[in-house]
Image (cartoon, rainbow, N blue to C red):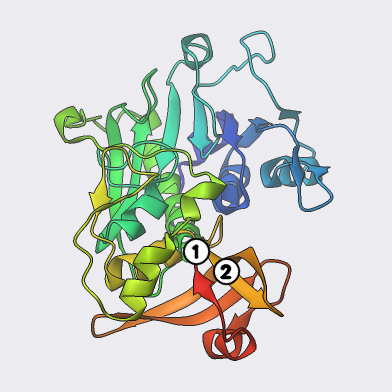
Amino acid sequence: MTKINKFVSRRLEIVFFGTPDYVLPILEVLHQTYRVLAVVTQPPKPVGRQQKMTPSAVSLWAKEHHIPVLTSFTPLHISVKNEVGVLASYGRIIPRDVLEIFPRGIINVHPSLLPKYRGPSPVTAAIAAGERETGVTIIKLDEEMDHGPILAQFTEEIKPDDTTGSLRDRVFKKSAEVLATILPDYLEGRVTPREQNHEQATYTKTIKKEHGSIPGKYLQKVLNGEIIEESFPIPFIKDSSLVPDSSFLERFIRALDPWPGGWTNIKLTSYQVSKLARLKLLKAHVEGEKLVLDQVQLEGKNPVSWQQFVAGHPGYQFA
């Protein structure tokens, strides 16, 4: 069990910046060790078919623990007596006037081996690009995106069946353990920040629903084991493209799980009437040069095996 300096623990007040559920292990560790003065999180967003306004996971956690919740932040909002903020998947760039509130800065937990995969989608990018390992880098935040000096870094193997959801959960749980050690060391001057090699930086983009689209012409070829000679741009990695062979498309499907999912448009014909529908590709594997679909889901329907889908829609065509 990690030992925490009790003096630092008693006196330190922290403001936490974060939004999704997978950062809660970090918030739990901070809450157990320090005083979380407030959380800053994204405002409620519409969720589901009913578009119900739903608070973030961090907001719900904070309210359960009677911790103030802010959905915007300026220097006037709060008086921070002690040194540091901690940020993990907050979702917004922190401006200089907020950075300057904290005498020891804001510590950012970023799920990649910086300077690779800066930006909002590093876990998804690492899986899609075929990396064998990723990790987490803890940096001191500056005004540029994921640019600040490195305080700590660890690696994590990417398993053959990892999705963005499974890998992200794993690295953030480990991040909480690492942060519990590195934060008191940093505050007591036992950590020397080191500059990133900015020339090696690569960048990711915000993932959009349409980024899960796999053109039917590619999908049909890899299902048949045919060779594709043209490149496919990876929409959430800046200036990146790969040949969409069976291995890439299998990774692409896992990378976009749980959201937005890999999908393709399909043409269905019934009683001489044709219509276009979206087919979500839930699970797949590779056999030789072929991509084999295991589970799919037609929009508005329940998930089924690929064999069940083909049997139920014998006249399907990739659009």
Q: Nearer the viewer, residue 238 or 115?
A: 238
Left/right of residue 172 with respect to residue 234 in the rendered view: right
Q: Nearer the viewer, residue 192 or 132?
A: 132
Residue 292 at x, y percent in the picture: 39, 82
Q: Nearer the viewer, residue 34 or 173?
A: 173
Q: Which residue is mark 2?
A: 267
Residue 14 visible in rendering: yes
Residue 235 at x, y percent in the picture: 38, 45
Q: Is residue 279 above or below residue 309?
A: above
User: Helix, strand or loop at disc 1?
Assistant: loop
Q: Which residue is mark 1?
A: 319
Q: Residue at x 21, y 30 (%)?
A: 194
Label 2: few (<14), some (14–19) or many (≥20) C-alpha neighbours in 10 Å: some
Q: Are marks 1 and 2 in contact (CB under 8 Å)?
A: yes
Amino acid identity at mark 2: Lys
Q: Nearer the viewer, residue 141 or 219?
A: 219
